Amino acid sequence: MKITLIGMGSGTPAGLTAAGRDALLGAELILGARRLLEQLPAECTPDRAALYKAQEICARLQCADIAAAAVVFSGDTGFYSGASALCRALDAAGLPYTVEPGVSSVQLLAAALHRPWQDWQLVSAHGCSCDPAAVCRTGKPAFFLTGGSETPATLCRALADAGWGHVKATVGENLGSTAERLVTDTVETLASLEFAPLSVLLVEPCPLLPARVPGWPDEAFLRGKTPMTKQEVRAAVLAKLAVRPGDTLWDIGAGTGSVSVEMALAAPVGRVCAVECDPEACALIRQNRAKFAVSNLYLTEGRAPAALAGLPAPDAVFIGGSKGSMRQIVDAVLAANLAARLCISAIALETLQEAVAALTAHGLTAQVTQIAVSRSKQAGALHLLMANNPVFLIVRE
């Protein structure tokens, strides 16, 4: 039996390639989603079955006693298509087949906008988790397939909440059909509109903070009266933690969120969990998160170690404040991930002693570094060095 997997493009006869149409006309059995079966050319066989799960399709083909069968998919068979799962199932069953690709929705939208699409970032938010703000942090136009709970409006709302409400975006509805419609507006406006189920979203490049090494100036953060980890110490903390782009990171006793923000910028496709119990500090963390557009920073309001329950296992952890619960916090961190990279800051000698004791209780060696920073201050014609409090950084070895 000859089996052909066919991409139907927009799902209408007009979206078929010539090779795809020929394969359909020669098929004695056609399988696929009901919407597509209802749009087949009139000359096609009436022997059709509305199946879309790979194993069900494979089982039906195995018992079919015919010369040719076709399975239809919307869009292109190679672009987030169910065809990939069916290919694996057919390979496992030993059934030979051919693939006739179709026109994808990204091609249809690009053609409708009279634009090339080779520089777009292509993402599916259909049936899978998606962080649109993380996607749009690349500086490229971002194309989203939508569906289910993720609509153009929900994706735009997430982008607006990340501080990019003014960015332009386009929604393409029912592409390739007579009901095709393009809507271009700001992300904030599109977030309040409703669109057809068959829609895609193109977000223009979002403005990004300049790329730089960790250690943003203190003045870049909103701080109020909340204590903040200073620039030189922040840079050293991220170096001690060896933060990587996809890390899951905890910042315990986050204060203003300055370390959390630096973590989020250094791990753009990771996740940062800031834990803070002071309401005023929590408000500052939210403000700094919005200012730096780091949607991968998540705030947990509460006191550690209780507030750590339920957080995703960390790759690296910074403890900037413990409220007298250093031993219990270190216990909770190592219970979540015994191999977590860990850095603790201390100003008081008592805190230094607690941190070392908490690590040695687990059989770990504590490596201690002291950072003493002085900054110049003009006094008339002179410049005097004004010392900040020495800070100890305690790292597990």
Image (tube, rainbow, N blue to C red):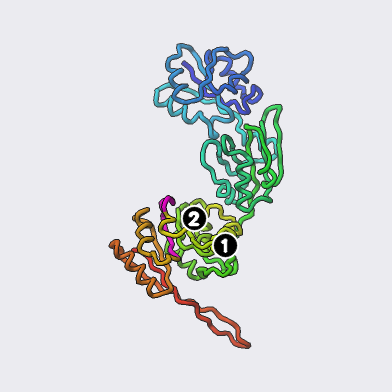
Q: Which residues are magenta?
A: 309-320
SS class, disc 1: helix
Q: Quadrant of residue 321?
A: bottom left
Task: Give residue 284's mark.
Answer: 1
Which residue has dot 2 on it?
300
Query: With 2 as the anchor, is 334 left or right in this view?
Result: left
> Is residue 312 one of those drawn in magenta?
yes
Query: With 368 as the anchor, is 42 left or right in this view?
Result: right
Instruction: Name the residue at 54% across, 68% down.
Output: 226
Say whether residue 119 is visible.
no
The image shows residue 337 at horizontal and vertical percentages of 36, 54
Say whether residue 215 is visible.
yes
Tell me the CA gap for discs 1 and 2.
13 Å
The image shows residue 141 at horizontal and vertical percentages of 63, 46
* Label 2 CA crowd tier, 10 Å (few <14, some 14–19, many 20+): some
Relative to 176, residue 190 above or below: below
Instruction: Name the residue at 63% across, 32% down.
Output: 198
SS class, disc 2: strand
Instruction: Name the residue at 59% across, 65% down.
Output: 222
Give the main secondary structure, helix, strand or loop, of the magenta stretch.
loop
Task: Give residue 355's mark.
Answer: none
The image shows residue 163 at horizontal and vertical percentages of 63, 53
Judging depth in this view, the residue of 307 and 338 nearest the camera is 307
The image shows residue 11 at horizontal and vertical percentages of 62, 25
> Is residue 80 one of those drawn in magenta?
no
